[in-house]
Amino acid sequence: MKQRIILIYLIFFIGNNIAFPQQKTHKISFDLTVASELQASFKADGRLFLFMDVYPGREPRFCSPTSWSVCSFAKNITNWKFGDNLKIDSSFGWIKWQSTPFLTYDDKELGWKIIPGWSFENIPEGTYYMQFLWDQETFESPINSSGNIYSKVMEVKVDKSLEVNISLSELIGPTEVIKHELVKEISIKSDTLSKWWGRSVFVKASVLLPARYSQNPNTVYPIRYNVAGYGGRYTRINNIIRDKTFMDWWLSDEAPQIISVFLDGEGPFGDCYQMDSENNGPYGFNLIHELIPYIESKYRGGNSPETRFTDGCSTGGWVSLALQLLYPDFFNGCYSYSPDPVDFENLVLTNIYKDKNAFINEYGYLQPARRHSFGKPQSSLKDWIQYENVLGTSNSYMNSGYQFGAYAATFSPKGQNGLPMPLIDPITGKIDSLVAENWKKYDLKLYAEKNWNTIGPKIKGKIYIWMGDMDSYHLNFATHSLDNYLKSTKNPQSDAIIEFTPMNGHCTQYSNRKVLEQIEAKLAAIYCLNP
């Protein structure tokens, strides 16, 4: 009997850890050049990325941690002299310059950061779409920022060991706002952030004016402050202007006379979440005391809480709700769609206060992070964090510029190395209970519980939340937890509207027009009660 159990275990272990039949693998080396026309834009120090995708029709450099078909490699490189070919040798992971002897690195300390399971020596046979990116600019957090350079996508068939010649030939251009008579661009120096960082810090936004704004020079307008999904820039206004259906409506007599302000998500470690934090600095103070007063004085805002609203989806859903809760007297309503976790007992599917590990759940399985709207898991939290580890110049997600790096920057204490302290160990997934205590300050359900006597009366009629009950990132569980708490409140009883739609995924019911019409309806009710 004991022998049968051992045999069954071995069959199970082999079946779950070895691909059978095993694919042939081959070594790949690269000869990388920089196009001559980019000499003036090229910088000698940066982080080199190689992305490999199995699907055609998209640029691998834009893929996210939830793109399970993408493998990524990254390495910090210094003193890359323009004109020197960069040779990446698959046998040793070495780098050499064409005009100099081998320059080698100790792979244990300075080698390639690779998603586990891959290396230049074991690329399975198949067709891949490869792309290099040279991240040489540090003034913006994402790797696809202005000033970085990249290669065109190259299709490579791997059926033998080979050397690939590829050129960094494309430059990412500057961030620009579309030219339109109703569009305005905002860029102001924040005295608060500049003092905190010890350098000049500028914050940006874009403004969409109502169609009849110029015809009514004495009219004061309500303002909607829109917060984007993760990392969304103020330039998203460009997509709105190019949306003919929306603009036909916006220019018609049906459209509400409301100013839309599109806030910028850019921050030092990724999305700034418009919050004060120990790592990013006083972004919340800047928004409330510098940026909003400037915009409202310049574009005839009401300068009144009665006519000031927030909205957004995903990250924007969390931020819009957080702003309404933290500054209940400053805003008159939030329209929060598919918000990020509003309760950290449900950070995706992890309870950060009780669970010991974020990668493996209590049943011994990988913790899912993303799912299809029919429930099929698409990626694990471990995969997600390991992808972000590749993005960060620290070889960890702590400065990845992506989602969990931004969470750490916003919610965690400052670490001794100048980076945020990790809640989740980037390699093992172990949860740091001391860091989790610091995250409680940003747990929106906990905040509401602790401050209900104060904020409850102030947010009456101001909370609208929508959530799909098959949210791609399992965010519905945290929102249900908040909903259950709000339904239990007394003195006052919460009148928050929280809607759940069965079988709907992430942000599926969000639209700019819908939010504007919701705000218009609320304004109509206010003016009816207070003519």
Image (tube, rainbow, N blue to C red):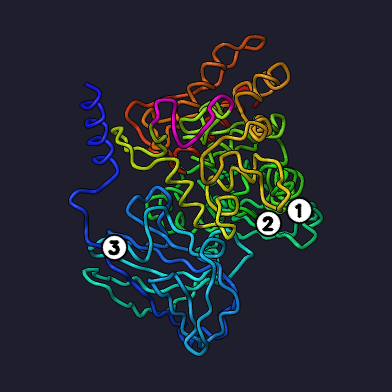
Residue at numbered disc 2? 203
Give the x, y percent position of residue 494: 59, 16
Q: Earlier in the sequence, mark 3 or mark 2?
A: 3
Mark 3 = which residue? 57
Q: Residue at x 40, y 56 (%)?
A: 63
| Residue at 25% from the left image edge and 35% from the top image edge | 12
Q: Secondary structure at mark 3?
A: loop
Q: Check disc 2: other Cα within 10 Å, few if <14, some if 14-19, many if 20+.
A: many
> Taking the image as drawn, is residue 11 in sight?
yes
Name the residue nearer the viewer: 488 or 216.
488
How far apart are the two marked residues, 2 and 1, measured between alpha carbons?
A: 9 Å
Which quadrant would the C terminus be assigned to in this image?
top right
Tell me how far mark 3 sits from mark 1, CA to CA: 41 Å
Taking the image as shown, residue 356 lies to the left or right of residue 6, namely: right
- In front here: 153 or 460? 153
Q: Which residues are magenta?
A: 353-364
Q: Position of residue 503 (x, y in %)?
A: 32, 29
Residue 117: x, y in percent? 37, 53
Circles 2, 1 touching at the beta carbon (< 8 Å): yes
The residue that disc 1 covers is: 193
- Of tags 3 and 2, the one toward the viewer is 3
Identity, as a three-letter code, of the amino acid under mark 1: Leu
Identify the amino acid type marked 3: Gly
SS of the residue under disc 2? strand
Q: Identify which residue is drawn at 45% across, 72% down.
A: 150
